[in-house]
Amino acid sequence: MIRIGILGTASIARLFFGAPLSRAAIVAVASRDAGRAQEFARHYHIPRSYGTYEELLADPGIDAVYIPLPQHLHHLYTIRAAEAGKHVLVEKPAAVSSAEIEQMISACCASRVLLMEGFYREILAGAPRDVALQRAQARLARSEKYAHPFFWAPFIIVGDNGMTNLN
C-alpha cells in the first residue's frame, strides 16, 4: 500500500478524489492554514492533517506526496520531498524553467525517488482512477531500476534506455 500525502488544499487537489483506491491511501494533507487542512481532511476522510508542509514531509508514514501547489513552489517542495525520501507526484507544469527541472530531477535521482508530472491527467484522460493509480504504483515500485526516474506526461519515462513508452 502506497501512503500518499497532499501538499495543499487548493481546488485542483480535489481532482485526486473519486473512486476508492485499492493499492494506495491518502493518509495526510497539509496546508499553510491548519484549520483549512483539518477541514479538508474531515471532508475527504483523511486521517492526518498538518498546518505546515514541512510537518507532512517529516511524517515517516508517507511514501509519496502529491504537489498541487502554485507552479513557483513546485521546485522547492519537490526538492524538499525528495530530501525527505518521498516519491513526488507534481502538478503540471513541473517547473517554471529548465534549470529548475534539472535540479528537481537531480534531487530525486540523489534520493532514489520517483518524480512524476501531471499525475491526474492519466485519470482524466479516461483511464479508470484505480487503474491509473495502479500504473503509478507500479512505476513507484520499479523506480529503483532507473538512474533518471522522471516520468513525463505521464506515460513516458526517461530511464537507462532513454525515452520508453510504458503503455
Image: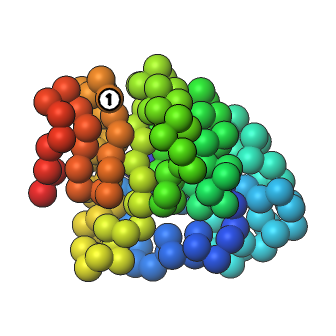
Q: Residue at the spot x=25%, y=66% of the render?
A: 131
Q: Residue at x 86, y 60 (%)?
A: 34
In the visual, does 126 lie left or right of 49?
A: left
* Residue 48 can be seen, yes or no: no
Is residue 147 visible to us here? yes
Asked if residue 3 lies left or right of residue 142, the reply is right
Asked where in the image residue 146 lies, by quadrant, the reply is top left
Q: What element carries label 1?
A: loop
Q: Where is residue 164 in the image (x, y as percent from the top left)?
A: 14, 43
| In front of the other: 77 or 101 | 101
Give the image quarter of residue 10. Answer: bottom right
Give amino acid for label 1. His
For residue 58, what is the image quadrant?
top right
The residue sitting at 75% across, 40% down in the picture is 54
Q: Which residue lies under the disc numbered 1?
A: 148
28 to the left or right of 142: right
Image position of 161 with respect to 40: above or below? above
